[in-house]
Amino acid sequence: MEESPSTSRKSLMENLLGLLRVRVKRGVNLAVRDVRSSDPYVVIKMYNQKLKTHVKKKNVNPEWNEDLTLSVIDPNHPVTLTVYDHDTFSKDDKMGDAVFDASTFIEALRMNVTGLANGTVLKRIPPSKHNCLAEESCIYYSNGKIIQDMILRLQNVECGEVEITLHWIDLPGSKGL
């Protein structure tokens, strides 16, 4: 028996923890893939979801400030961020990638803290060979929400970093944290 669209949506909502909003802030010192510059954009993947930012023309230090929102079913599932150089007449060039984990962020959310002073740090994650962090990442309390800032060092490329911020969105009707 085939599931109706409303049945499959209901089972998705039953397994959905909430939404992970990834704010792609900016790229720093991205690789040159065209003659003197690049036309970068970012693709974020988790499960079968694939979201992308707009292309920034001729810029190796682009400012995106775009929010990409992923549905989270398994908090331990890694998120892949890949930077590409947009090309008009050929396949887009890959400009590096980074994998990050939202599980520590979700653990901090599950602590269910409220009423802390703005800027209170809940957890610090040091860079290591097991993550793509360029420097220490902080999970902190701000205006009643828990946020994580990350600077990801791109792998499989000669240079480049991408700054992102994680936010959580609870959805009515979802399983929740």
Image (spheres, grey):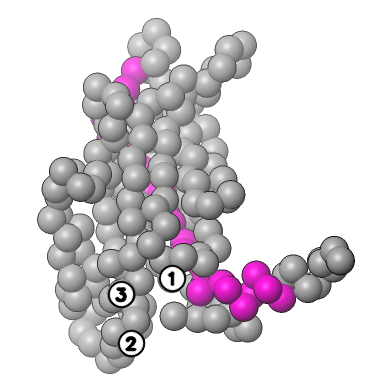
The N terminus lies in quadrant = bottom right
For the point 39% across and 16% down, the residue is 33
In the image, residue 21 lies in the stretch drawn in magenta: yes
**Disc 2 residue type (three-letter):** Asn
In the image, residue 142 lies in the stretch drawn in magenta: no
Left or right? Give the position of 129 relative to 3. Answer: left
**Disc 1 residue type (three-letter):** Trp
The residue to which callout 3 is attached is 107
Q: Position of residue 71 (x, y in %)?
A: 55, 63
Secondary structure, mark 3, is: helix
The residue to which callout 2 is attached is 112
Highlighted magenta segment, given as a residue range: 10-32
**Disc 3 residue type (three-letter):** Glu
Residue 146 found in image quarter: bottom left
Q: Position of residue 29 (x, y in %)?
A: 26, 29
Q: Position of residue 55 (x, y in %)?
A: 52, 32
N-terminal of the two: label 1 or label 2?
2
Outermost residue on the bottom side: it is 115
Q: CA distance from mark 1 to mark 2?
A: 12 Å
